[in-house]
Image: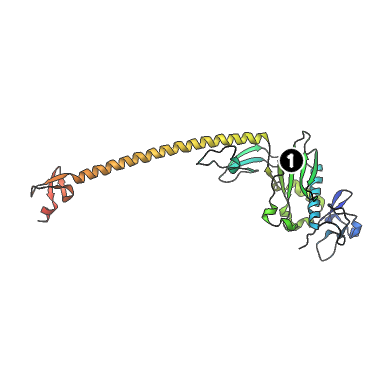
Amino acid sequence: MAVLNPFGLRDEEIVLIKDIEENQRGVKCNCVCPLCKEPFEARLGNIRTHHFAHIGNKGCSEEKAYIMGMYILLNEFIKSNEIYLPCVGLVYTLPNYCCIDMEHINNYVKFSSYSKPNYEFKEVYKAQKIKFDSSDIVSDDKKVPKAIIAKTKKDKKLAIRITFPANCCKTIKSNKNRKVDKYENYSTLEINLSLLGAEILQKNKKEIFDYLNKETSIYKWIYTNTSRTKEKYEEIIEESKKHYEEIIEESKKHYEEIIEESKKHCEEEERKRKMEERELTCTECHKKKPQYEFWTYRGNEGKCKECEKK
């Protein structure tokens, strides 16, 4: 299935196909491809969903043009709006069989913007909205965007990456390709637009900007590189150490209880064995016999089973 591109570029700004008027159909839209800058035409037919496309066979792939268009649109949004930064938190579990150390802490601790059932949660930063001073798109050797690097006035940098709608980009249909990883060693924020799907072809720029402003659930931290994170890591390591010491102490106590119970059991078994092995005197035949040869007895005397039968 061909990729239907909602993004065109006019005067260095993104134009959404939904914003194109009827009298601007075809080449009258005056738009070019966001990536290769070849002329675009606005296809506003009555059968297929409205979209932009290269004229003839010229230009790059519609998919790469789509990806670049989405990144340019997001970059425009960043330059003109505050960006929602979700709470930076750490979810983790404390293992019972070892202490967490800094080398292996990523095996037990993950970044999250919210708490999860059955997990500990430690907040690093509260959620906030921030206006960046500048932002630029970084691309690979083939000019395909990889991330947006946004900077504050204090020169703090953040990488922003997009999760695209699966039905719009063929190369990102698989879960593996759709997964967003951290960008280099930057603190990395994911903006998940996968739920938009083909709806993006039905939205104008204002509606998409409103969506980016209101839907805080689409923002997620992939990685944060801050000194405060390291401080929280150290707190978790200390918690793990105390937890492990408590587990060891409880195990020792439980082991001692088991030893004591075993000792009492052995003593009881020994008492029973001695009772069974002692000899009693039969009051009828006056013979000495083991205790188990008697039904009833008192002290060291009783009537043996053999005499009882007589």
On the image, the x and y values in percent for residue 221 come to 68, 43
Q: Is residue 114 left or right of residue 47?
A: left
Would you say 33 lies left or right of 148 here? right
Total count of labels: 1
Q: Image quadrant of residue 167?
A: bottom right
- The quarter of the rendered structure image containing the C terminus is bottom left
Decide which of 103, 248 is in the foreground and name it. 103
Q: Position of residue 233 (x, y in %)?
A: 61, 36
Q: Is any part of residue 150 visible from this angle? A: yes
Q: Which part of the image, by quadrant, shows the N terminus?
A: bottom right
Report the residue that reaches farthest toward the bottom.
Answer: 47
Q: Pointer 1: residues within 10 angstroms few (<14), some, or many (20+)?
A: many
Left/right placement of residue 166 relative to residue 307 reads: right
x, y (%) of residue 157? 75, 38
Element marked by disc 1: strand
Give the labeled residue for mark 1.
Answer: 158
Could you tell me residue 177's position as x and y percent?
70, 53
71 up-or-down from 229: above or below: below
As drawn, which residue projects farthest toward the front?
Answer: 141
Quarter of the view holding residue 182: top right
> Which three-letter amino acid code belongs to the residue tagged 1?
Leu
**Residue 207 visible, this orientation:** no
Task: Please state if 125 lies on the left or on the right of 249 as rendered.
Answer: right
Q: Is residue 1 above or below residue 124?
A: below
The residue shown at (37%, 41%) is 258
